[in-house]
Image (spheres, helix red, strand yellow):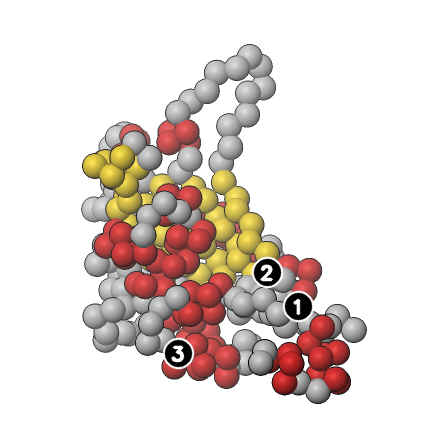
Amino acid sequence: MSIIEKTTHKEKKILKKRKLSPSILEIALKNVKNNMVLYESLKMFDKNTDAYDHLCKMIMSNKQILANIMKFAMKECKDLTIEEIINSIENDPRINMTINDHDQIVGMNVEDQSVIGACVRYDILFKATLPTKKGKKESVGIFINFEIQKDETPGYPLVTRGIYYASRLISRQKNAEDGFASSEFNDLQKVYSIWICPKHTKEKNDVINVYHIKEECLKNEWHNQVEDYDLMEVIMMYPGNEYNYE
């Protein structure tokens, strides 16, 4: 017997008035064994609290959960298995909190001071080495930043901040230990800044938008290789919540 069949007539009416859509975090957790405790804990916390924000970051630092979301959101990962994605994550993802678990990402330095006087602290930052479309014998490094944002209206458009973060991840590569030297711009590596906003207006419920660089020919037609400019993507995720549309 289904859940709806067990409910009263009044409860059925309430269920019909709600849009029941699992969040991206819930989807990831359901795809990972032995994480039901985290899944149940996530549902217990008010999305407005620091505790919820802290728990989300802890959950997101798990390689299996990261891999599930990467497969769903990143085009470079769609044809890979979860195991392949996990193996592509270098022992270099880090969050701005202490974790003592071999399944958690360890991470790169989340503090970006590449611009003097404009320090940025990323929630989660790591690098993945993924196969190219040309075949699994060739690979490309990608820097990936995840942000958990409990306040969707901080006084400015979040997507604008996402673009700034992605731009910083691009610019910090020049003359960096994990970047490129001098004018070797062909060694510039693609970046992703992925924002998960658990609390949002119902107009954005279950919405996922991607912002990236696109070529447009204004006069005559000639095309650069896509990999020469496809170097930055910002993904905004608004997980499905329950709303009463009455």
Q: Quadrant of residue 224?
A: top left
Q: Is residue 115 above or below residue 26?
A: above
Q: Is residue 231 left or right of residue 24?
A: left
- Element class at badge 1: loop
Which numbered circle lies on residue 212?
none
- Can you see residue 109? no
Mark 2, mark 3: which one is toward the viewer?
A: 3
Q: Residues within 10 Å of mark 3 (few under 14, many from 20)?
A: few
**Residue 150 image position (x, y, % from top left):** 53, 69
The quadrant in which the N terminus is found is bottom right
- Residue closest to the eye, 1 or 233: 1
Work out how far the residue at label 2 is from the one at label 1, CA to CA, in angstroms: 10 Å
Residues marked 2 and 1 touching at CB (< 8 Å): yes
Work out which residue is located at the far front of the displayed protein and give it: 1
Q: Is residue 95 left or right of residue 177?
A: right
Three-letter code for the amino acid on which mark 3 is drawn: Met
- Element class at badge 2: loop
Residues marked 3 and 1 touching at CB (< 8 Å): no
Three-letter code for the amino acid on which mark 1 is drawn: Lys
The residue identified by callout 1 is 19
Q: Quadrant of residue 244?
A: bottom right
- Residue closest to the eye, 191 or 153: 191
Q: Is residue 150 above or below residue 147?
A: below
Mark 2, mark 1: which one is toward the viewer?
A: 1
Three-letter code for the amino acid on which mark 2 is drawn: Asp
Write the residue at 75% across / 85% down. Answer: 10
The residue identified by callout 2 is 206
